[in-house]
């Protein structure tokens, strides 16, 4: 009641394949995967940069 059953999901998936085509869906899936990977890399790199900035500040404080 209120949930989506397996048969309804299959019908929706079939309609999506008809609208976009399997080639376009594969391309969209690849683009989405690349975007997620780039986002995760950016988040990880940002954390490393903040860590480097903190260490640089501590080192300059200790030099004084």
Image (cartoon, rainbow, N blue to C red):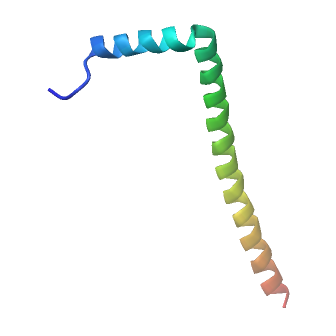
Query: Going 65% across and 19% down the picture, which residue do you hit?
Result: 27
The residue positioned 72% from the left and 52% from the top of the image is: 45
Q: Identify the image quadrant of residue 54.
A: bottom right
Residue at image point 34% right, 16% down: 9
Query: Measured from the top left, where is residue 58 in percent x and y?
Result: 75, 79
Q: How many marks?
A: 0
Q: Position of residue 29 (x, y in %)?
A: 59, 22
* Rendered-image quadrant of the N terminus: top left
Rendered image quadrant of residue 40: top right
With 15 as the anchor, is 7 left or right in this view? left
Picture quadrant where residue 64 is located: bottom right
Identity of the residue furthest to the bottom in this view: 64
Examine the rendered structure and indicate whether residue 35 appears above or below residue 26: below
The answer to whether residue 13 is above or below residue 33 is: above
Report whether 41 appears left or right of 7. Answer: right
Viewer-nearest residue: 10 or 61: 10
x then y, percent, for residue 12: 38, 15
Farthest residue in the front direction? 19
At x 69%, y 49%, the residue is: 42
Q: Position of residue 59 (x, y in %)?
A: 80, 78
The answer to which of 63 and 22 lies nearer the viewer is: 22
Placement of 13 over or under 29, stated as above or below: above
């Amino acid at each position: 009641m209120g949930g989506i059953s397996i048969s309804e999901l299959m019908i929706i998936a079939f309609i999506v394949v008809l609208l976009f085509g399997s080639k376009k869906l594969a391309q969209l899936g690849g683009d989405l995967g690349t975007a997620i990977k780039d986002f995760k890399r950016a988040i990880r790199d940002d954390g490393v940069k903040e860590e480097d900035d903190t260490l640089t500040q501590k080192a300059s404080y200790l030099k004084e």
